[in-house]
Amino acid sequence: MKEDVRVLVVDDELIMRDSLSDWLREDGYNVVAVEDGPRALEKVKAEEWDVLIVDLKMPGMDGIEVMREVKKLNKEIPVIIMTAYATVDTAVRAMKEGAYDYIVKPFNPEEIGLTIRKIVNQQRLIRENIYLRQELRRQFQFKDIITKNPKMQKVLELVRSVAKTASTVLIEGESGTGKELIARAIHSCSARRKNPFVAVSCAALPETLLETELFGHEKGAFTGAIASKKGRFELADKGTVFLDEIGEISLQTQVKLLRFLEEKEFTRIGGTKPASVDVRILSATNKNLGKLVGEEKFREDLYYRLNVVCIKLPPLRERMEDIPLLTEHFLEKYRIENDKEIRGISEEAMELLLRYGWPGNVRELENAIESAVVVTKGSLIEPQDLPGTVTSLEEKGYRLGKSKSLHDMEKEYISYMLEACGWNVKKCAETLGIDRTTLYNRMKKYRLKKC
Amino acid sequence: MGDDILQSLKAAIAEKFENDCRILGALEIPDDAFDPQRKQYASTPVLREIVATAPADTKKILGVVDVDLCVPILTFVFGRAQMNGKAAVVSLFRLRQEYYGLTPNPDLLRARASKEAMHELGHTFGLTHCADCRCVMYLSNSVRNIDIKARDFCEGCSGLLSAFKL
């Protein structure tokens, strides 16, 4: 509906103002006309406009100055500059300053109508695009987890169904794949969501401290225990405890944890009276717990207690289709945090992100984008804004398609993947879809060694 | 200007707007309407003159001129109207085949004049341009566009017209 399109005409000549406004009204637009820049700025401050049509030559502020000031207030408003005194210089100046179009008075009726229609269509497309992006994000977003990868979608389905139960859940995935996010998602979809979610990083604390953290201690339990302290299990009563890096806990702590899981009771360090709490245990590991059980580094009974439901998170290199979505999400996050005008990422930079192996997974991608947002001087993230780890592969010339023979191609590709996986042979073999022995044979054949 | 064209317009208007339609005497185009630089006639003074000559009982008045009309902001206009007002004007100048170096075609001229008359009178009833290129309220910037559109209002514009006429 054209009535919805608001046009502000700025021209010092009454006759021009009136005839343009009349004509635009006949064409169905909602038009307001003012005679100078200051009045135009007042109107732009006070109301929303779809298009501004501004005369170039006006006493006081000329059309380009008006446009400049208008753009400071709202850089999105399309401005058409019109003039009766057209020169190439003024046209170039107007366009450089950000005019949408430059038209010469008197204009062909078709010309101005077409220009406004073009603007209206473009604005509509922009609005539609913003809407669709939001919808897309909503579609691929679940509790801060953004994905369109089928494996991850299955993970999310599992998260939804397991959240309603009371089962313990073991989340397996490489470092940076978002294990804590999944744990938080389970908690926030569960009946416990209004109660605390308490995360404990088991690797960050030495054994004795970890036990104190988990179970709490009584006053005088050890030197420095000047007051009794509640443990994380108590703090999380009726909520969820997330034990990250569970593979790192000592066998002694494992015994205590097992007892707690079996009896739902615990005793504070230095205490005698057992206490009970109602918590759900979620745990996560970047190690192969089954293997640790085989090596007798992890108690089998505890393993089965924790692993009632197992959620395996794929590494980022197995969900490359999520890279553009995640990049956009992080760009938006860090653009706002750093208050920077960033439109997006260049095709070349995106290509690099898609080629890289991301051994540090989503966390590494997030860090890369955060750093690029901070570093960039332009409005578009370019390859040089990305961290060296991401771009170094490119510098070393690992560009696919440059090689001539299959032999060279295979050598380069394996070399590229090894580099991308941080020379982790197991990871690299998995990514390439071959077993480790085959990869070692190829490395030997091509004499590939970490420099 | 040939009487036949005025007669055909009178018949078309009377039928469409279901009202008496009279042909008045010749219109005097005011001197100040002529723009010597553009060698065209400004449509505003012409419209003003049309309003001035309208008899008191006139609901709507349409001027038909044979000069090239313009408005300050546009290179030319086929016609002009007072939006929601009384008066409208159409120019036959650019509707004639001769203007484009072609053989005169009285039937085509009558058809074009009728469409433009309906269009401008539509504005006086408050109708704005229509997106349907077959509707007479479609914005025509060339005779090609005029020839494409029908002589009548589309369903939507007809509905609005009867609402406005009330």
Image (cartoon, coloured by chain):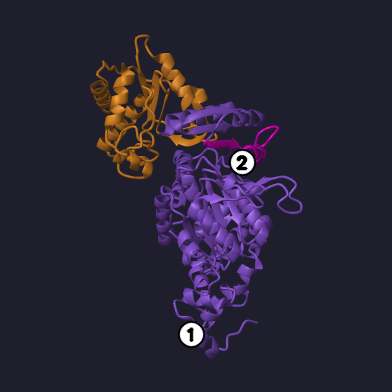
Tell me which chain appears purple: A
The amino acid marked with disc number 1 is Thr
Position of residue A390 relative to residue B74, above or below, is below
Position of residue A153 relative to residue B46, above or below, is below
Residue B12, by quadrant, is top left
Q: Is residue B19 left or right of residue B58?
A: left
Taking depth in this image into account, of A380 and A301 the one nearest to the observer is A301
Please tell me whether residue A70 belongs to the stretch shown in magenta.
yes
Mark 1 sits on what residue?
Answer: A437
State the image coordinates of residue A306 (x, y, percent, origin top left): 48, 59
Mark 2 sits on what residue?
Answer: A85
Residue A125 in view here: no
The amino acid marked with disc number 2 is Tyr
State the image coordinates of residue A185 (x, y, percent, origin top left): 49, 50
Position of residue A112 relative to residue B12, above or below, is below
Please tell me whether residue A182 belongs to the stretch shown in magenta.
no
2 and 1 marks in contact (CB < 8 Å): no
Residue A64 in view here: yes
Taking depth in this image into account, of A18 and A378 the one nearest to the observer is A378
Q: Which residues are magenta?
A: A50-75
Q: Is residue B40 left or right of residue A393?
A: left
Chain B representation colour: orange
State the image coordinates of residue A104 (x, y, percent, origin top left): 55, 42
* Kind of element beneath mark 1: helix
Pointer 2 and pointer 1 on the same chain: yes
Mark 2 or mark 1: name the one nearer the start of the chain.
2
Quadrant of the frame with the C terminus of chain A? bottom right
Q: Which mark is residue A268?
A: none
Q: Neighbour class for label 2 at 10 Å: few (<14), some, many (≥20)?
A: few
- Give the farthest residue toward the top: B56
